[in-house]
Image (spheres, rainbow, N blue to C red):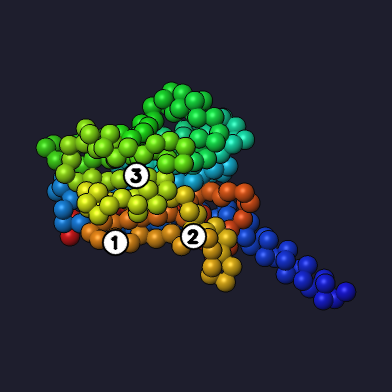
Amino acid sequence: MLFIATLFGIGAILFCYMLFLAHHDHVRYQTIRDERLPAKFNGFKIFFISDIHRRSIRTTTLKTILSQIDIIVIGGDLTEKGVPLDRIRNNIKKLQNMHAPIYFIWGNNDYEASPEKIKRMLEQEDVNILLNASKDLKKGDHIISLVGLDCYRYGSVNLEAAMNESKGRYKLLITHDPSTYMELNNNEKDMFHIVLAGHTHGGQIRIFGKGPYERGKLRKIRDTNVLISEGYGYTTLPLRLGTNAECHILQLKRN
């Protein structure tokens, strides 16, 4: 009986710890240094959040961000099936308090929810939806282009259409599933200087360091800076182990 009680106690502690990790926010401050960055964008700051799913963004977490943000990027899975539309709208309104333009790409769970209702709500809240589309950001005569690709599982990835109107020589790709970028050929990969992705949750629950996906991280692939976030929320179970609930502040700097 003592052995069973001990196992039960350990299990309860582990469960509470996993629940804590799933709801304990980490704001990652990361710097991307690139001499190719247009000079007038030196110091440009991006708030990147992906895979919110069922969570409500914590106002206390956003209040810890004291620096001025230039743009907000939502990297897909803003929601999932069964999440009330009011909760999604409230999350958008919390992000709007950062007083920066918001850009959104679709994730697989967004499509599994109510995409038409989500689209209508995002348009009402002045969120820029990048569906195989680009948006040029200008500072004087310097331009960087945000390029957003559709979710390949439910949509249709069209890189040519997404790039069609981008005029910036410096390009930032936003794609929910990192495999969309990984499956591009080398010439296509080399068109982008920065890639932002999510989807994997870093494996979400890792046993002895092993999980279905690699841990999220910022790394260099060829000559491109690629950030794969472990995501803000969770899927299936409100638990994490060996991963973090995270969002990111990326500062772009010239070398």
The quadrant the C terminus occupies is bottom left
Question: What x and y, as percent, mark residue 176?
Answer: 42, 45
The quadrant the N terminus occupies is bottom right
Please, which residue is most extreme toward the left here?
141
Question: What x and y, as percent, mark residue 78?
Answer: 49, 39
Residue named by callout 2: 213
Q: Residues within 10 Å of mark 1 (few under 14, many from 20)?
A: few
Question: What x and y, as percent, mark residue 50?
Answer: 45, 46
Q: Residues within 10 Å of mark 2 (few under 14, many from 20)?
A: some
> Callout 2, which amino acid?
Tyr
Residue 33 in view (yes/no): no
**Mark 2 falls on what kind of element?**
loop
Q: Is residue 202 left or right of residue 4?
A: left
Residue at 28%, 56% in the rendered image: 225
Q: Earlier in the sequence, mark 1 or mark 3?
A: 3
Residue at 76%, 68% in the rendered image: 9
Decide: marks 2, 1 in contact (CB < 8 A)?
A: no
Residue named by callout 1: 220
> Callout 3, which amino acid?
Ile
Residue named by callout 3: 174
> Callout 1, which amino acid?
Lys
